[in-house]
Image: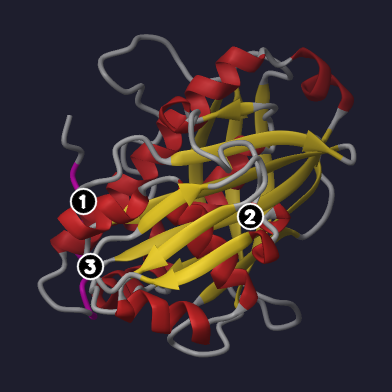
């Protein structure tokens, strides 16, 4: 669901980055551009800390405690790149202290006539419980839209796009999708329908992966594609979400949507979605079988 709604939001987006990570090495570099040959990996035998040290403009040294060192050497190349990015952003400090991530890391940028989004967030809830919630697509409509159109921190006014409804559909002749209704409140005012296809691409339980794509072009976007990964680190019950997506939008949105508006609204909505995952997971008394209806906290 994280990917679904960040895709809806970022399908109207341009450059917008998370400010608290500005001084980190890979702040403006997407995961797929990280070159592992430039990262020296060593086992940290003195303590259990993850130590990331920039050694030159392009190179760095990463010292890992044994459980992370063993994990890194056995995991996929994609996960290694994500791991390096996490270390460069100092997210392992939050993992160790079981703290909320605060402002999620988000990078939005233009490339090859598309808008691209990368987001990383630490979710301090048990992954086994969260997995039940995340993969129960039918019940998304019960909780995922909670406060999604409410401005944060008492701010007034409306978002430039409202997400009104979504329903999981499982047709016989094609794959499952979310039938989603959104409203544009400024540019191209009106109500629009999007069909967002969702598919579980997990090869195994250790590397859960979901993919997302729009079934056909719409008035708002020509294409929406994305993948989000759920990373469960060794010796941890909590997990990390990494989302990477790309979209093409129409000429009007591309040229006239204010960048500062996009920056603030994308980060607000992402944070609300993360809170909803925590809220829904904590409301479950058992890992499965819950039909709890959520009430707004406001």
Give whichever of discs 3 and 1 has the lower sequence position. Answer: 3
Q: Which of the labelled discs sits on residue 294, or is there none?
A: 1
Picture disc at residue 31: 2
- Residue depicted at 65% across the width and 65% down the height: 36
What is the secondary structure assignment of the residue under circle 1?
loop
Identify whether 182 is placed above or below 96: above
117 w.r.t. 243: above or below: above
Quadrant for residue 201, please give it: bottom right
Q: Is residue 162 left or right of residue 104?
A: right
Residue 143 coordinates in the image, percent (x, y): 31, 53
At mark 3, the secondary structure is loop
Residue in front for this viewpoint, 192 or 249: 249
Magenta span contains residue 200: no
Residue 48's label in the rendered image is: 3
CA distance separating discs 3 and 1: 39 Å
Residue 291 lies in magenta, yes or no?
Answer: yes
The residue located at (67%, 46%) in the rendering is: 58
Tag 2's secondary structure? helix
Regarding residue 46, the answer to whether it shows in the image is yes
Range drawn in magenta: 288-295
């Amino acid at each position: 669901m994280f990917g679904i709604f960040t895709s809806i939001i970022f399908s109207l987006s341009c450059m917008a980055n998370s400010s608290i990570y500005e001084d980190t090495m890979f702040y403006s570099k997407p995961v797929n551009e990280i070159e592992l040959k430039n990262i020296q990996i060593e086992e940290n035998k003195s303590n259990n800390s993850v130590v990331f040290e920039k050694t030159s403009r392009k190179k760095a040294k990463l010292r890992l405690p044994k459980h992370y060192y063993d994990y890194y050497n056995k995991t996929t190349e994609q996960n290694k790149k994500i791991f390096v990015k996490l270390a460069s952003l100092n997210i392992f400090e939050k993992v160790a202290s079981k703290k909320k991530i605060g402002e999620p890391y988000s990078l939005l940028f233009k490339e090859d006539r598309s808008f691209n989004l990368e987001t990383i967030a630490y979710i301090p809830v048990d992954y086994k419980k969260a997995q039940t919630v995340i993969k129960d697509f039918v019940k998304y409509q019960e909780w995922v839209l909670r406060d999604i159109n409410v401005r944060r921190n008492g701010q007034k006014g409306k978002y430039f796009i409202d997400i009104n409804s979504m329903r999981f559909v499982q047709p016989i002749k094609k794959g499952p999708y979310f039938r989603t209704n959104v409203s544009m409140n400024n540019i191209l005012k009106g109500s629009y329908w999007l069909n967002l296809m969702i598919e579980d691409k997990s090869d195994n339980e250790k590397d859960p992966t979901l993919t997302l794509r729009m079934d056909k072009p719409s008035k708002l976007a020509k294409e929406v594609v994305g993948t989000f990964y759920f990373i469960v680190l060794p010796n941890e019950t909590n997990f990390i979400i990494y989302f990477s997506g790309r979209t093409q939008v129409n000429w009007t949105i591309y040229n006239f949507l204010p960048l500062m508006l996009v920056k603030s609204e994308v980060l607000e909505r992402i944070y609300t979605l993360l809170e909803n995952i925590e809220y829904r997971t904590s409301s479950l008394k058992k890992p499965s079988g819950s039909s709890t209806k959520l009430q707004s906290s406001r």
